[in-house]
Image (cartoon, rainbow, N blue to C red):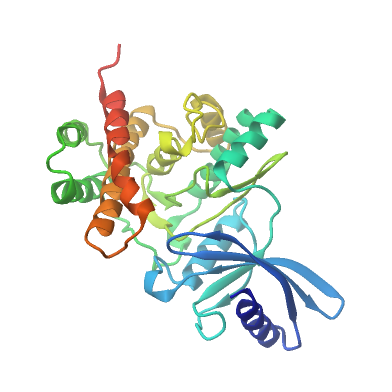
Amino acid sequence: MSGNTAVGLARFLSAEAGGAVSVSNVRQVSAGARRRTVAFDARRGTDGRRLVATIVPAAIQRLPVQAEAQVRELARKHGVPVPAVVAICTDAEFVGAPFLVSELIDGETVPRKVLRLVQAAGIGERVAAQLGKAMGRLHAIDPHDAPAVLPGAAESDPAGTELAEAECGVARLLADRPVFALALRWLRGRLPDPPLRRVLLHTDMRNGNLIVDGDGLRAVLDWEGARRFGDPMHDAAWAALRMWRFGCDGAEFGGFAGRDAFRHGYEQVGGVFDADRFRWWKVLCTLGWGVGLAEQAAAHLDGSVRDIVMAASGRRISEIEWDLLMQIRPEG
């Protein structure tokens, strides 16, 4: 597979450059259910570069690769740390699917390794603040400047729309779970008004989609879920869910540090942190993840995706129920 990938990448880059480009040292650095990422070395004459190809089969693209590249470059232009896009290929003939080529950024991406690195360097507060700054800079971008193909409408009610989708998911997959019914009742009773300002969202900016080294946050990855005109607290809440802390449950944001560090970074670049909206979105995002786990388990059970990891997802729903109860319990 790596040999075929190397040949395909070399052919594409040679055509792009208008001259022979050689590709070597191809190695897979991640392989999710949707995307495959390979790092490689490219050379044209005496000029060598370390690059990454993100390969996305067209059948499962959440965004066309062109749109993902555009939103990444828009974010990078506004100070969000994102690997620079080098080339875009929409043709499946080279490596079997469309792909993006980006600069290689050194650092760690595996969440537990990230946390070990951060703890050893004593930079948890710094990384949480840097995450807040990255998100604040993203939210400062005019969403009208983002590709029109991104989901989200300027006059939308983000909370109402997302709650309706969650209700459908619970009705379809979790109708017999009283904690989810209780959480939905809590959410309905506290549904916030549309935000004063709708923003460009990443929707998955959390530990696991970050590159971190000993100096802190280097880059934000995986922009396939970007959307326009969302509630900024949606992004903030998703980053704070317990499953992205990987055992460091006392550090709300990614296992790095608590809320104060993130909030400081976010507000330092002009973001407005609304604690009440944040709490509402955190409950909805937790519930939404529970629906997602149920969908994965259902896909295994109905035979559409026979995978033990998908099957095991269903066993984690009880963890989500605990999280929901802890989040909606009366304060005081």
**Residue appearing at x 23%, y 56% in the figure:** 301
Residue at the image position 61 percent from the left and 40 percent from the top: 114
For residue 289, what is the image quadrant? top left
Is 293 placed left or right of 246 in the picture? Answer: left
The front one of 63 and 107 is 107
x, y percent for residue 67? 47, 69
In percent of width and height, residue 70 lies at 53, 67
Front-lying residue, 174 or 224: 174
Q: Residue 38 lies in what quarter of the image?
A: bottom right
Q: Is residue 19 depicted above or below 1 in this figure?
A: below
Left or right relative to 84: residue 267: left
Q: Position of residue 2 (x, y in %)?
A: 63, 74
Q: Residue furthest top?
A: 332
Q: Quadrant of the C terminus?
A: top left
Which quadrant is home to the N terminus?
A: bottom right
Residue furthest out toward the right: 46
Counting the numbered discs, the total is 0
| Residue 136 falls left or right of residue 114 | left
Where residue 274 appears, x then y in whole percent?
Answer: 39, 31
* Residue at horizontal 33 percent and vertical 46 percent from the top: 313
In which quadrant of the rendered view does residue 76 lie?
bottom right
Horizontally, residue 249 falls left or right of residue 171, namely: right
